[in-house]
Amino acid sequence: MPGSRLSRGWKNFLKSWQLYIFLLPALSYFIIFHYIPMYGVQIAFKDFYATMGIMGSPWAGFEHFERFFNSYYFWRLLKNTLIISVYQLALFPLPIIFALMLNELRNGAFKKWSQTLTYAPHFISVVVVVGMIIAFLDPTTGIINHIVQLFGGDPIQFLTSPGWFRHIYVWSGQWQGLGWGTIIYLAALAGVNPELLEAAKVDGATRFQRIIHINIPTILPTVVVLFILNIGSFMSVGFEKVLLLQNSLNSETSDIIQTFVYETGLLNGQYSFAAAVGLFDSVINIILLVTVNQIARKVSENSLW
């Protein structure tokens, strides 16, 4: 019986070998850049010395984890990372709302113009986006402060104020990713049965009622899956933009786990300690992913697995 299954599998492979070749680049990418590097995770439990290699370095157990948990900066890093992550998660519905709004537009030219205008920022590099933020928010030459002064206000030190950092980071990210995030939802809305919409119109349903009772239930499985994927990277705040916007005056709210891993690992050469901190961050993401996936499967019957 196992032999016949193997034979059928081999025949199917030979029959569709071209499709497997198309799959090979993506599979190679994940193996080379995601699975093979997992071998190096063990340095989080060792005192790693480059001259001794991974296998030759002595074991340290949970020493680096304990050092991180007992450090004075642990709670500040965790708090800042959680606040930014929750802030971003709270804005998760914005691409859904925007997709529903675009879907209701009947003027084709205006719809295409709106899509292009909102998609474009996604293709701007993080460095350029940060440069724009710095230029716009400059206290002397920035256009935002010119507008503030125009209405009688005093210039605001946006980039050196800890209270403004999270708002700048999160909302600039929303501006950059809003249009791109709507693509999947618009594709899901394209699958709405037009007969249902026509029947709802005949029954006297308003546009808002059609959105609530037809459009949203149709895209709900997509929303659930994307929400779970979002949770899977809950603690993974993009450190590049944080690092570029960070300075000694706003570090009170801009210090996060990812920037700390970068500084301790690459700048200070504490590879084992940085690996332990990064592994702690990844474990939290995995626990959240599995938990939310289980809840979603029980509540909505939609899940990743």
Image (cartoon, rainbow, N blue to C red):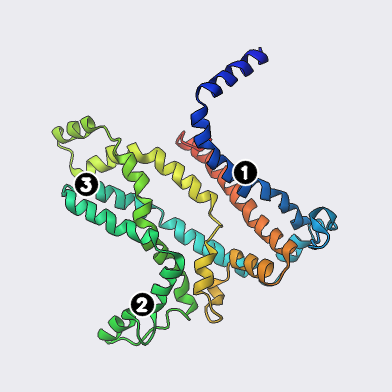
In the displayed structure, 224 sits above or below 254; it is: above
Q: What SS does tag 2 mark?
A: helix
Write down the quadrant of residue 257 in the picture: bottom right
Work out whether residue 168 can be spotted: no
For marks 3 and 2, give the one nearer the viewer. 2
User: CA separation, marks 1 and 2?
Assistant: 42 Å
Kind of residue at disc 3: Glu
x and y percent of residue 120 in the render?
A: 33, 59
| Residue marked by disc 2 | 136
Q: Which residue is mark 1?
A: 31
Circle 2 residues within 10 Å: few <14, some 14–19, many ≥20: some
Mark nearest the camera among 1 and 3 is: 1
Residue name at image x 27 percent, y 54 percent: 115
From the image, tell me which residue sits under label 3. Answer: 104
User: Could you tell me which secondary element the residue under label 3 belongs to?
Assistant: helix
Camera-near label (1 vs 2) is 1
| Three-letter residue code for mark 2 | Phe
